[in-house]
Amino acid sequence: MQQESVVRARNLPPDQAGEMVCFTREGVVPATFLAALHKQQIAWMSEARLGGIPVIRACITSFKTTERHIRWVVDEMNRLIE
C-alpha cells in the first residue's frame, strides 16, 4: 500500500507568513509528477524540500478556495498516479 502524506509547515520565517500545504507519496518523483500535473492543467504546484525531503507544494492564491476545491485537486492528483 502506498503511503501518502500531507505536511503542514509551521513556524515559517516572518517573510513566509501563513501556512504551506505539501504532499508526499512513496515512489513519486516530484519533478516528473509536477510535469504531468502541469500538462493536465489541474493545479499550479512546485517542488520544495522540507527537512531535506522533496515534496510537492500547493500554491493556493485565491481566498475563495474551499476544502471542496482541495479535495478535487487531491483526487485528480491520485488519478495521475494510478
Image: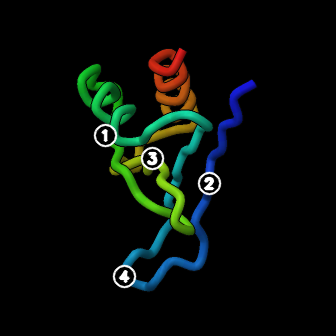
Disc 1 vs disc 4: Cβ atoms closer than 8 Å? Answer: no
Q: Residue furthest bottom?
A: 14
Residue sitting at the far right: 1
The amino acid beneath tag 2 is: Val
Residue at 34% x, 48% y: name it.
46
Residue at 59% over, 38% down = 25
| Residue 53 rendering spot, x and y as whole percentages | 53, 58
Query: Of callouts 1 and 4, which one flags the residue occurring earlier in the amino acid sequence?
Result: 4
Q: Is residue 20 above or below residue 55?
A: below
Q: Residue at x 44, y 38 (%)?
A: 29
SS for dot 1: loop
Q: Position of residue 30 (x, y in %)?
A: 41, 41
Q: Is residue 78 left or right of residue 35?
A: right
The label shown at residue 73 is none
Q: How many angstroms separate mark 1 from mark 2 (CA)?
A: 17 Å
Q: Earlier in the sequence, mark 3 or mark 2?
A: 2
Residue at the spot of label 4: 15
Q: How many angstroms separate mark 1 from mark 3 (CA)? A: 10 Å
